[in-house]
Image (cartoon, rainbow, N blue to C red):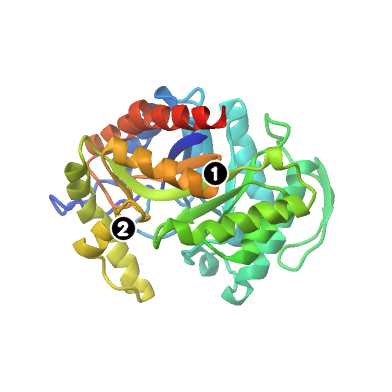
Amino acid sequence: MEIGITTFVENTPDPATGKLLSPHQRMMNLMEEIELSDQLGLDVFAIGEHHRPDFVVSSPAVVLAAAAVKTKNIKLSSAVTVLSSDDPVRVFQDFAHVDLLSGGRAEIMAGRGSFIESFPLFGNDMKDYNTLFAEKLELLIQLNKSEKISWKGKHRPAIDNRGVYPRPHQPELPIWVAVGGTPESVVRAANYGVPMALAIIGGGPERFVPFTKLYKDYYKQAGHDPARLQLGINSHGYIADDSQKAADEFYKPYAYVMSKIGRERGWSPMDREHYEMMREPDGSLLVGSPQQVIDKILWEYELFGNTRFLLHISVGTLPHKKVMRAIELLGTVVAPAVKKAIGATVK
């Protein structure tokens, strides 16, 4: 199993001081987080795209390009690229640059986007939410396979036998499709034979088992080699030296963000009781001691048979030193233990 980190590069008030970091400082902290993840041997670092004031990064490829020249081994991915509101040609070119700078470590994690600010910003109509993604994913996959392309669709000007450059360092860029539990998205990823990343940020993980089974069944039915199937699980979480410390440190920044988003979407605000319920062994939050996080990753592996797990540590702004400590525990304690346990199971 590959193990790594996702982040939206949040910039929310520090619960202890009420102050915001400057965007420059938040970005410098991010570079240190990526460098540490690489040094510790984590497999993936993935950055999300947003167009709102509480998240810093609107162009993951630009930030990943900076990270490419500061790292040596770690895979550099988006999480996600909001493909529906972007131009697939430009997305492909941007990540080809990241791939060249990194020597073949770039990935694209494409999604429809759960935040919708980019749609009106770039002149897209929300009534086309589903068809935009379907059409643009098809184009992106074709661009990845062919240097020259002819293509015609509804949402973008036609392309008449044009070359798209630069080409990536890898023969093809890995393209993952990120889903949040929509069956149509699951089936689409399976039919294309591309890896799927499933975000579990609420509810019990067990309720997502039918989605992973659907993916595996359709992947095989579409004629793809089951041995090449890749399935990722992305979850919110945090690791500290002991369980109570982790719970206390993570709660306020997590509750701030989830309550704020809840107000926008009609959810109930996050309270400590609900938070602690989510931390239970069968809950969606991986917040606790290293052993608790190890146990939950392995439990989810039993449920899903996933080949990748990405931990989203910075839901709301935590002190930088604490984020770095969480990354250190993930890289030095959690990841080795999980890989050893899974290796023993496979053997």
Label 1, residues with CA under 10 Å away: few <14, some 14-19, many ≥20: many
Residue 36, placed above or below residue 187: above
Q: Which residue is mark 1?
A: 306
Residue 185, percent from left and from top: 63, 61
Asked whether residue 333 is in view, the answer is yes
Q: Is residue 174 left or right of residue 240?
A: right
Q: Quadrant of the C terminus?
A: top right
Residue 87, percent from left and from top: 65, 55
Marking on residue 52: none
- Residue drawn where x is 52% and y is 32% of the image: 345
Q: Quadrant of residue 212?
A: bottom right
The one of 114 and 235 positioned closer to us in this rendering: 235
Q: Secondary structure at mark 1?
A: loop
Asked whether residue 139 is in view, the answer is no
Which residue in the rendered view is the most extreme toward the left?
17
Q: Is residue 222 left or right of residue 56?
A: right
Total count of labels: 2
Q: Secondary structure at mark 2?
A: helix
User: Mark 2 is on which residue type?
Assistant: Met
Q: Which residue is mark 2?
A: 278
Which callout, 1 or 2, points at the residue further toward the start of the chain? 2
Q: Quadrant of residue 340?
A: top left
Residue 152, percent from left and from top: 81, 61
Residue 114, placed above or below residue 38: below
Label 2, residues with CA under 10 Å away: few <14, some 14-19, many ≥20: some
User: Mark 1 is on which residue type?
Assistant: Asn
- Residue drawn where x is 39% and y is 24% of the image: 40
- Residue drawn where x is 26% and y is 65% of the image: 270
Q: Is residue 264 left or right of residue 220?
A: left
